[in-house]
Amino acid sequence: MVADIQEIIFSNFQLSKQRSGSPQIGEEVTRTAQRHSHVPYSAETDFEELLSRDKGLRDCRKQYKGDKVPGARYLTVSKVLRPPTSLAYVGTNTSEVHALLDLQGSGRPQTVRVLKNLAQPNSVAWYNGTLFVAEPNRLLRYNGADDCVLSGKPLPAPVVVLSPIAPLDPNSKVIGFGPDGRLYISINAACTSTGCSCGGQVIPGNDLLTYCSIAYLLPNGTDFRSEIKGIRKTGGLAFDPSSTAPFIAYTSQMPDDAAYRNVDDLFYYQFVYALTDLGSPLCQWTGRGSPVVRSIGPGNVTADSNLTVTSLLNNPAGTSKARNAYCQDNIVKPSQALGPQVGATGMRFYTGAQPGYNTGVEFPKRFVNFTAFVAERGSLTNPQRPGFRVASVRVTNGNGTSTSHVNFASGWLINGVPWGRPVDVQPLLDGSLLISDELAGAVYRVTYSKSSNLDGT
């Protein structure tokens, strides 16, 4: 059950936010609903209680027209602070990076612009007090970022780790650290004036680093090579925190045009060193069940009938039947089909409250480990407006089989018109969950109220 966005109703889960609009939180645990007042996350004043079903959203949007995190996109969190302090960094599609610093664990952080004059610093990653920032074609490292933010000092000049990252890939990058101490980064399709393609070498003469892949490198920029190949565009990536082995989860996006309106965005989970080929651009998946919320599992795979070139790296020549057979027998299956053109982007596994932090806001124990939240920023070209929500996918330990796929948060659409676009999710150390919204320029914090009739297991 998911509550009506027009009524601003939540059940068990509560949400605080920075600015306009109000997503609804719904999940299979929802049983009773009640109206809440809302406290903004990292904003200067409190929301008044939304008393009117008809004017509540419009009033909120006016009240927070001046937002503090414009173009909010990918998130990362510092993991070495002492309770109750929390510190999160927010990349944007503008020129700035922001920090959300909550010294007292009150849920009311100070919003600090820590970087400016960058070129779309879309994605950020934290590693041992250092902040990594990915522009579309430059990877930067800011040493001692945590210490600077905590002491109110500006961040130092960046160390340029990579420039360019991949010369023919103009898209925003996604980055994240694995438990192996390596930084993983998305390398999307190579694009020129004649179109985009997969499989070509990023560095001429180097077969180890190719377009349409997830690559890794050491924090100093060395040992740069592709690990997962055949992924046309990576929306998000994260590692399973319940395992010391590097099990990676990631989302794959299909093109947002009319030719692909029946082809799904995907959620994958696997051991990172499996030398994976996902089959893009040849192979594509269509999930089972309703396109709004797909049934559990990956669905069916076929060869892309829109492709006419058969000489690509993983695109065997031959008949349509032979190409379909190749896709069925030779590529890695996703864990879950997410729906066509939902715009799957950032995702994280839920970890619960960390030792020493307030556990009064964390989600029920069944969410801890193996439940991933997936932001879906939605499609602006598909008239059905898929996405504009946060889904949850639960997988089994080790083999990545999906056992649950549900809608967790939605409501960023009003009569088919989006007022917000969720891009990323990030658990905080107290067990709450951050959601970034690039269109509304907001960061939301979702908490769980244990004063419900649920048993919390």
Image: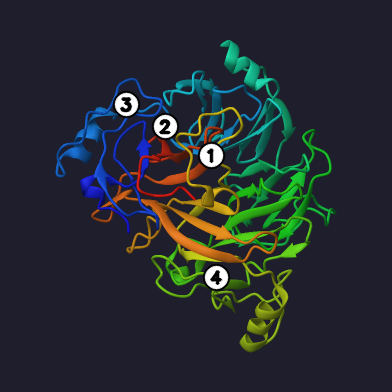
Mark 1 → mark 2, Cα distance in angstroms: 21 Å
Q: Is residue 367 above or below residue 103?
A: below
Query: Looking at the rendering, in which quadrant would you find the N terminus?
Result: bottom left
Mark 2 → mark 3, Cα distance in angstroms: 9 Å
Mark 1 crowd level (few <14, some 14–19, many ≥20, 10 Å Cα):
many
Camera-side mark, 4 or 2: 4
Percent x, y for residue 423?
47, 45
Mark 4 → mark 1, Cα distance in angstroms: 25 Å
Q: Is residue 285 above or below residue 46?
A: below
Residue indicated by mark 4: 297
Helix, strand or loop for disc 4 = loop
Helix, strand or loop for disc 2 = loop
Inspect this view and state whether residue 154 appears. no
Percent x, y for residue 103?
51, 18
Say what amino acid the circle numbered 3 marks. Answer: Gly
Mark 4 → mark 3, Cα distance in angstroms: 42 Å
Percent x, y for residue 173?
61, 44
Residue indicated by mark 3: 66
Residue indicated by mark 2: 70
Mark 4 crowd level (few <14, some 14–19, many ≥20, 10 Å Cα):
many
Camera-side mark, 3 or 1: 1
Camera-side mark, 4 or 3: 4
Residue indicated by mark 1: 427
Say what amino acid the circle numbered 2 marks. Answer: Pro
